[in-house]
Image (tube, rainbow, N blue to C red):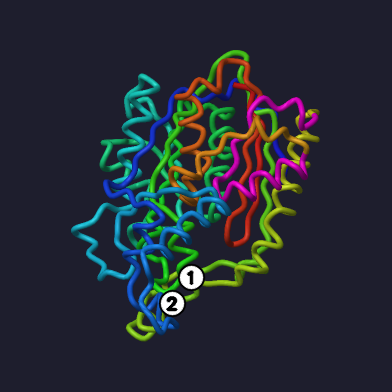
């Protein structure tokens, strides 16, 4: 689906939130359970840990991430931060940054792959924490869900909504397979939120949304709901999939989404002032820039600070880019993400 332009749509404010515990690559490796090293005949040395940690930084661009839960430890839902608490904190920060109250919000849209409950919606729970009396719903399209929410919010603003609160929040640490070292090093927890409103001269120039459910097997949690003891024991509610096939497919999806959205907006790639992609790895971001023709120096990259935080990825990146002064009025901004399910999306905003 292609849509836009939606005149007047703008970002009024943004906020982020992260778990208290921040771990370096070396700390992640050191704290992984013994099952992650079951193939080893001898203990891992400090020198080996430092070597692997540096390799991850060089290949993925990741240096640290925040976790609500220590991978491999028993789950303690009551005693750890959750997608709900992180999403609520980010939403409060976004409202404060926008200078508005929750009473001025017409719609709350939440994007997540790791909700705090099986039923109902994360958006309703966050709304309750904020004291909201408005419509609320979730978007569940993997790491691209925030862009589906952005496009949905723009349409509601054009239809008469006053302001829309878009939230992306994840706690991947609770579903990372303890034996999967790459997943542990690649994924983080966190939340980002934006308040969307209207301002003369601003615009959602174009958006592109696409889904192919036949590719859902490439990254998934394949356990059926409601959970059963057998599926829990099997690991059915932890991330699984076909990582090699996923890596082969993803760059093409970014290229497709950005190609469509730039064409609809009537722009060349070199006319984009700032590119804020989903933050998977520095290598992937560079490859997408090369394929599409966006100069790499115009891409905002913060994957080194947070790793891949799923649906919160580009939201957090945009909030941090705004805080660093990278998004002055008139900025032509491109956004893009690919998510499990599989869905991919892109958007162009004139800020």
Q: Which residue corresponds to the image point at 35% horizontal and 21% vertical from the top-left?
A: 100
Quarter occupied by residue 288: top right
- Magenta includes 203? no
Q: Which residue corresponds to the image point at 75% horizontal and 42% vertical from the top-left?
A: 290
Which residue corresponds to mark 1?
A: 221
Q: CA distance from mark 2 to mark 1?
A: 6 Å
Residue 291 or 241: which is nearer the viewer?
291
Position of 2 compared to 111: left or right?
Answer: right
- Mark 2 element type: loop
- Mark 1 element type: loop
Quarter occupied by residue 92: top left
* x and y percentages locating residue 84 in the rendered image: 31, 49
Q: Earlier in the sequence, mark 2 or mark 1?
A: 1
Tag 2: Cα neighbours inside 10 Å, few (<14), some, or many (≥20)? many
In the rendered view, would you say 115 is above or below 314?
below
* x and y percentages locating residue 91 in the rendered image: 36, 36
Which residue corresponds to mark 2?
A: 236
* x and y percentages locating residue 180 in the rendered image: 46, 71
Residue 253 or 23: which is nearer the viewer?
23
* x and y percentages locating residue 227 in the rendered image: 36, 76
Q: Which residue corresponds to the image point at 31% horizontal and 36% vertical from the top-left?
A: 132
Quarter occupied by residue 13: top left
Which quarter of the rendered picture does the C terminus lie within? top right
In the rendered view, would you say 111 is above or below 340?
above
Q: Which residues are magenta?
A: 268-292
Q: Which residue corresponds to the image point at 38% horizontal and 63% vertical from the top-left?
A: 29
- Magenta includes 290? yes
Position of 87 compared to 181: left or right?
Answer: left
Residue 195 or 107: which is nearer the viewer?
195
- Whether label 2 touches label 1, CB < 8 Å: yes
Position of 132 compared to 293: left or right?
Answer: left
């Amino acid at each position: 689906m292609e849509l836009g332009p939606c005149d007047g749509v703008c970002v009024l404010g943004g906020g982020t939130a992260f778990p208290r515990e921040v771990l370096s690559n070396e700390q992640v490796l050191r704290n992984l359970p013994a099952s992650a090293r079951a193939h080893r005949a001898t203990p891992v040395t400090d020198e080996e840990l430092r070597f692997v940690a540096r390799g991850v930084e060089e290949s993925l661009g990741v240096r640290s991430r925040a976790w609500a839960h220590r991978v491999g430890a028993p789950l303690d839902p009551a005693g750890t931060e959750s997608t709900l608490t992180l999403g609520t904190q980010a939403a409060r920060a976004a409202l404060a940054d926008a200078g508005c109250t929750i009473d001025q919000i017409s719609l709350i849209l939440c994007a997540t792959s790791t909700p705090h409950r099986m039923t109902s919606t994360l958006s309703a729970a966050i709304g309750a924490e904020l004291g909201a009396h408005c419509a609320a719903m979730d978007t569940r399209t993997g790491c691209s869900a925030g862009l589906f929410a952005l496009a949905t919010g723009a349409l509601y603003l054009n239809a008469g909504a006053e302001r829309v609160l878009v939230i992306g929040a994840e706690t991947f640490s609770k579903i990372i397979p303890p034996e999967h070292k790459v997943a542990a090093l690649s994924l983080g927890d966190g939340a980002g939120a934006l308040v969307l409103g209207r301002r003369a001269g601003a615009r959602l120039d174009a958006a592109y949304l696409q889904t192919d459910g036949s590719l859902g097997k490439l990254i998934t949690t394949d356990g059926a709901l409601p959970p059963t003891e057998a599926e829990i024991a099997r690991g059915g509610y932890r991330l699984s999939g076909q990582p090699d096939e996923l890596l082969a497919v993803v760059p093409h999806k970014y290229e497709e989404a950005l190609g469509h959205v730039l064409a609809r907006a009537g722009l060349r790639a070199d006319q984009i002032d700032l590119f804020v992609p989903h933050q998977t790895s520095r290598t992937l971001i560079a490859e997408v820039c090369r394929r599409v023709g966006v100069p790499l120096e115009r891409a905002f990259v913060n994957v080194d600070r947070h790793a891949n935080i799923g649906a919160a990825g580009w939201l957090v990146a945009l909030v941090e880019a705004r805080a660093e002064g990278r998004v002055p009025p008139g900025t032509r901004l491109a956004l893009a993400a690919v998510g499990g399910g599989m869905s991919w999306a892109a958007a162009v905003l004139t800020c």
